[in-house]
Amino acid sequence: MSLSATSLGPPAGEILPSKLNQFFFLGIFAIIPVIFIFIAFDYFFMNMRLSDAVWVNKNTFLLVSVLLQTPHSIASIFTFMDREYLSAYKARLFSFCLFMLAIFVLAWVLSPGSLMLAIISYNFYHYSSQQAGVTALLAHNKSRTHEVWKWASSLILMAGLFGAAIMTGPEQITVGPYQNAFYAIGIIFFTGFIGISILLASQSKTRIGKAYIAANTVMLITYFGFYLCNLWFYMLIIPIFVHAMTAFLFYINHNSNRNARRNINLVSRIRNVIPVPEYILTPLVSILCAAIFIPLAAESVYSVYMAGLASVVHFYLEAIMWKKGTPHREHLHF
């Protein structure tokens, strides 16, 4: 018999031991002033040599993948290493297996480049969906404005990435006389986005919700500003960092509450004999696994497909695991 989401949650009346401080979500955006300070140091003392070096160095992007991109994807997969959870999600996971089969058939027909383009595009929608979801949670309100805000954020992120790829790729495209027109369209779109953000903030029922909307808006304004200044590495690192750290807040809180109840699976039995706090153990184990997986995958001729597989699995799991009424959501405590 399948276990319901309710049966996997904490017993009625039990207070979960680990509480997620909502101000941590705001603290993640401290990456923005930190990067500004780094750029100021580079500008005044290093003549921007550091900024130029990180963009052209492929090892920089490998490091970003090991520290930020892949670890939280691995952390999401670890949370499903639970017999009760697999039973609760089995219908959705079976459907996902059929979906993955279709993806691989499509990938075989299309070129690896087309596959990665589609995955990267969805990746930014995934980022924006996370931020919109957290915004609704902190603001205690969700409306159609959230959907408009989410899609506008996705378009901004995608435009910045593809613009940077076009300007720095091996086959650079010269926009020539249309460059000013593109900038004008970007400024008009951003003005509209800021207006949507103000409207969304006015609908928030909490102060922290308003502050979180403001932080996201500042992040995307900074993203656009870095694009205009050709600081593409910093442009990309900010949303990647915010997304990964936000995800880890959820995983750490879930793991703390799920594993504290009893030794319910192999992961919790191993975890509960290790005298290390969850906020250290979860990221550390995920980063170590990423440090092993990424170099091995990079050596394979199927590296593009392996990266695509890992991304699609992660996207799907995060799309279902935090929905209201799911076993994962039952172990979050705000």
Image (cartoon, rainbow, N blue to C red):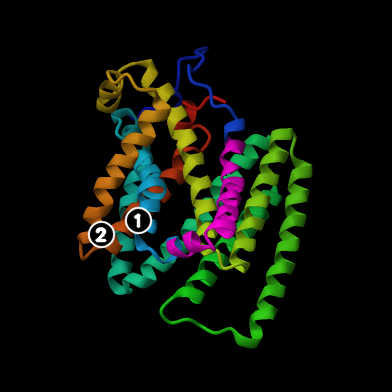
Position of residue 133 measured from the top left corner of the image (x, y, whole percent):
58, 43
Is residue 333 placed above or below 313 in the rendered structure? above
On screen, residue 311 versus residue 222, left or right, reads: left
Q: Residue at x 47, y 81 (%)?
A: 172
Q: Are marks 1 and 2 in contact (CB under 8 Å)?
A: yes
Give the structural element (helix, strand or loop) at label 1: helix
* 168, 182: nearer the viewer: 168
Task: For marks 1 and 2, give the one nearer the viewer.
Answer: 1
Q: Can I make out residue 8 in this image? A: no
Give the magenta-colored segment's residue range: 25-53
Q: Which residue was labeled with disc 1?
A: 62
Q: Find the distance from the CA under tag 1 to the CA under tag 2.
A: 10 Å
In the rendered image, residue 54 lying in the magenta stretch gets the answer no
Is residue 171 placed above or below 55 in the rendered structure? below
Q: Earlier in the sequence, mark 1 or mark 2?
A: 1
On screen, residue 71 versus residue 17, left or right, reads: left
Report the amino acid beneath label 2. Ala
Looking at the image, the residue that sits furthest to the front is 45
Give the structural element (helix, strand or loop) at label 2: helix
Q: How many marks?
A: 2
Q: Residue at x 30, y 63 (%)?
A: 304
Position of residue 35 measured from the top left corner of the image (x, y, whole percent):
56, 50
Question: What is the quadrant of the C terminus in the image?
Answer: top right
Q: Residue at x 30, y 73 (%)?
A: 109
Image-quadrant location for residue 25: top right
Report the amino acid beneath label 1. Leu
Q: Which residue was labeled with disc 2?
A: 298
Looking at the image, the residue that sits furthest to the top is 13
* 34, 289: nearer the viewer: 34
* 319, 113: nearer the viewer: 113
